[in-house]
Amino acid sequence: MKQLLLLFAFLISGLAFAQESPRQHHIIMQLTSGDTLVHKGLMRQLKNMKEAAPSMQLEVVCHGPGLDLLMTDRSIVQTKITEFVGKGIVFLACENTIKERNLDRAKVMAEAGYVKAGIIHIVERQEDGWSYIKAGF
């Protein structure tokens, strides 16, 4: 009986410890919309997510019309992006989109990183266990 009580106490303490340790989220978001309302909504989402899980790893992959989010001559949320980069959120521009849309790479925000193929990067992150979220309405 004493051993059973000790085992029970051990299990309960293990559960308590498991509940106290925060999860480490790894999230990859895909943005394909050039709609500025979607871009504003994404900024609110990122703010809420970072408040709820400050230690999460988060990448936003922009391709197709979504690349407008990172273009200095088109983005309406540049200040917010700079703020989020400072908080550890990574914004990535798809080089295939830059090439296909004949965009000036010099106009991509300096805070952005690059991936060769946005969709392949997303797939690779999912294969590594990251959670996927499509941004937009």
Image (cartoon, rainbow, N blue to C red):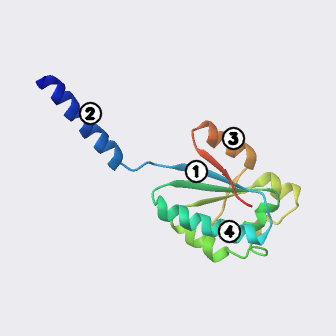
Q: Amino acid at mark 3?
A: Val
Residue where numbered disc 4 is placed = 41
Name the residue at 33% across, 49% down.
20
**Pointer 1 and pointer 4: residues touching (CB < 8 Å)?**
no
Q: Which mark is residue 43?
A: none
Q: Are there few (<14), some (14-19), or many (20+) residues within 10 Å of tag 3?
A: some
Residue where numbered disc 1 is placed = 27
Name the residue at 78% across, 75% down.
73
**Pointer 3 and pointer 4: residues touching (CB < 8 Å)?**
no
Q: Secondary structure at mark 2?
A: helix
- The alpha-carbon separation of the residues under discs 1 and 2 comes to 31 Å
Pair 1/2: label in front: 2
Q: Nearer the viewer, residue 65 or 71?
A: 65
- The alpha-carbon separation of the residues under discs 1 and 4 comes to 17 Å
Residue where numbered disc 3 is placed = 123
Left or right relative to 126: residue 53: left
Residue where numbered disc 2 is placed = 11
